[in-house]
Amino acid sequence: MVSEKAGKFGGNYWELQPVWTSSPSNPTSVIENENLDLHWRFKTDGLLAFAKFWLIGDDRLKKLIALKSSSNGSVNVDPAFRDRFIFNISNNQALVTLVAVQRSDSAIYHFQLVNQHLDKIDNDVKITVLFPPSITSRQCPSAVTEGHSVKLLCNFTGNPLPSVAWNRANTRKTLSNREVLFIEHIKHNDSGRYECLAWNGIGNNSTEFCEVDVNYPAQITDISINQTVQLGKNVTLCCRAMGNPVPTISWTHKNNVGKRTELHFDSARFGDQGWYKCTAQNGIGSPATARTYLDVAERASDFINVKMTITNEEYDTSLTDEESGRYHNLLERVIEAVGNLFRTDKNFKSVEILRFERGSVVVIFSLRFERTVNTDNIISVLKDAARDRKLGKFKIDPLSITALQDAIFPVTSSPKVSSSGI
């Protein structure tokens, strides 16, 4: 039995039905700003009644972009799309070119063909526009106080959805793989630049930076240890501090005496002697303080030449011979006895035996220190040790212990020296 349509048009109706022989892949991906060709091939009965190309919106409503009303007719394109869409439609194929595709072109497009018998075929294609990552906004903390928690945030777009990382810019260490970076109990050494990096394999990576400035209380990092200066000489006390904001420094003695890192005395007087307090403050937390003592002495130096008499030793000529056994034995014993007396003093550097002289045995030696000391105080220490028999097995006349003029030279060419801080 022949169908009504077959009888009407002659032959087999189904051979006249339009069919697609090829169509674009669905979905179709394209990188932003590139051109996209959508190519359909089809069979009809040779006569095309019309072709329509629609944009289907998110609300599923159709927006007609182009219409071709006959096989030989031209394609009418909506003016809103005329500069961006190029149509070439014949009786057996259609080529639609999207020029410089934009991300707003991501949508479903519907293509319909109708032959002269009003038989129609439809095809949908979903276009996905790929585009590079872009960080659209960032949230960086303003000045933050040490110990608080902070949040760094960057928002981004991109297709495919970008991966994201927060890095410490100076080390490139990754701290988070999320768009939010939390830093709990921030420390002052967390100050610096942080990088938000987004990437998705399309185009270039996107990067933004946050500068984090951590405020923290003043801290005194260094202050001059107790100083001794000779009367009339110059001396400088130093106090260094760190903090954010930068701390201000103040010195107090009997009253306020300075507001700089260094407190300088051109000519020290006895009235300058005493405790000095350094205060550093920057408005964050409590001020930091530290103290140092300034000793002003009539005689002061970093080395002292001393003369003392050993009463339980007898002088002989062997003590003028550096090669003699007695010379070396006595030299080593004196160095050990005097060195042991000062071994707990971090300022003590060495003992140098300059020579031995007649008078039981008179020893001329030099004491060296890392910094200036009060000569009278050192002589007092030696005298007290002599009275208390704390200089080894030697018997020393305390009254014989005196400080000599600085310019004392040994009789021998190479004085014997103890190691530092015996």
Image (cartoon, rainbow, N blue to C red):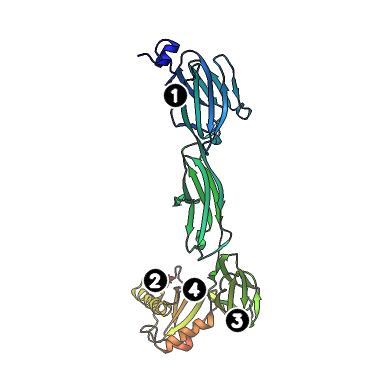
Q: Earlier in the sequence, mark 3 or mark 2?
A: 3
Instruction: Kindly give the residue lying farthest to the top in the view shown.
Output: 10
Residue at point 44%, 12% (across, down) = 8
Instruction: Quickly name the residue at label 1.
Output: 23
Between tags 3 and 1, which lies in front? 1
In the rendered structure, find residue 273 and report the number of the disc placed on it.
3
Between tags 1 and 2, which lies in front? 1
Instruction: Quickly name the residue at label 4.
Output: 369
Between tags 4 and 2, which lies in front? 4
Q: Could you say whether the residue bearing mark 1 is in a helix, strand or loop?
A: loop
Q: Earlier in the sequence, mark 3 or mark 1?
A: 1
Viewer-nearest residue: 19 or 245: 19
Label 2 is placed on what type of residue?
Glu
Where the C terminus falls, by quadrant?
bottom left
Q: Could you say whether the residue bearing mark 2 is in a helix, strand or loop?
A: loop
Between tags 3 and 2, which lies in front? 3
In-image side of 94 versus 273 (left or right): left
Res 362 visible? yes
Residues tagged 4 and 1 counted as in contact (Cβ below 8 A) = no
Above or below, 276 against 246 in this view is below
Q: Earlier in the sequence, mark 4 or mark 1?
A: 1
Label 1 is placed on what type of residue?
Ser
Q: Could you say whether the residue bearing mark 4 is in a helix, strand or loop?
A: strand
